[in-house]
Amino acid sequence: MKTTIAGLVVVMGLAAQTLKLPIDIENLSKAATETVDVTLDGSMIRFAERFLSDGDADQAKAKRLLRGLNSIQVKKFEFAREGEYSERDLQSIRSQLQAPNWSRMVHVKGLRENTEVFSQMRAGEMTGLVVLSAEPRELTIVHIDGPIKPEDIASLSGHAGLPRWNRGGDR
């Protein structure tokens, strides 16, 4: 998961319209054995773009994904034991991701993992994305603020805790 989060940060950049993480969530860092907190604003994203090459296909794709983003925020907590956070902790985040501006576009619920992807739409364009990934001993919240193209969402298939899905005939 560490590689996935680091890859998402490099590929996607950080959101400027900051999702307000509830104090309860922030307090989880006291119980966590490891906390990762990454926040990139627009100027940091533009700076990171300069290190990506247009000559390398993967780096060029990352550069395209970064272009125009306002910010990216990643918050990850790892815990020694299950039950260190509750469903109530996640509900305060979900309550911010309601209609009319936000809608849940993916929900994968397993026995040991729950992943949700929310999108923000304005004037028919996707302008934000939030990924909540909850495992028994790990909680990850990713918020991307800025214009996101559908083809960029498709390229996330199988990455950042998202399930692999069929992209126009891909198997």
Image (cartoon, helix red, strand yellow):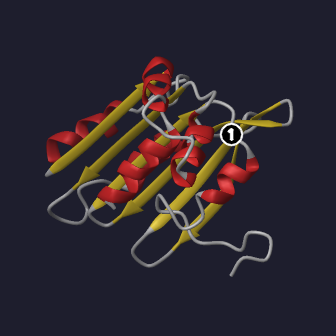
Q: Is residue 127 above or below residue 106?
A: above
Q: Quadrant of residue 116?
A: bottom right
Front one among 24 and 102: 102
Q: Where is residue 120 shown, x and y percent of the image?
A: 69, 37
Q: Where is residue 80 shown, x and y percent of the image?
A: 14, 61
Q: Residue furthest top?
A: 43
Quarter of the picture holding the C terminus: bottom right
Question: Number of marks in the image?
Answer: 1
Please report the residue visible at 39 percent of the width from the left and 40 percent of the height from the top. 74
Front one among 153 and 130: 153
Q: Which residue is mark 1?
A: 148
Please report the residue visible at 50 percent of the width from the left and 40 percent of the height from the top. 53
Left or right: where does residue 26 sit relative to residue 104?
left
Disc 1, SS: loop
Quarter of the picture holding the N terminus: bottom left
Q: Residue furthest bottom?
A: 171
Left or right: where does residue 89 sit relative to residue 145?
left
Q: Quadrant of residue 83?
A: bottom left
Q: Residues within 10 Å of mark 1 (few under 14, many from 20)?
A: many
Front one among 89 and 40: 40
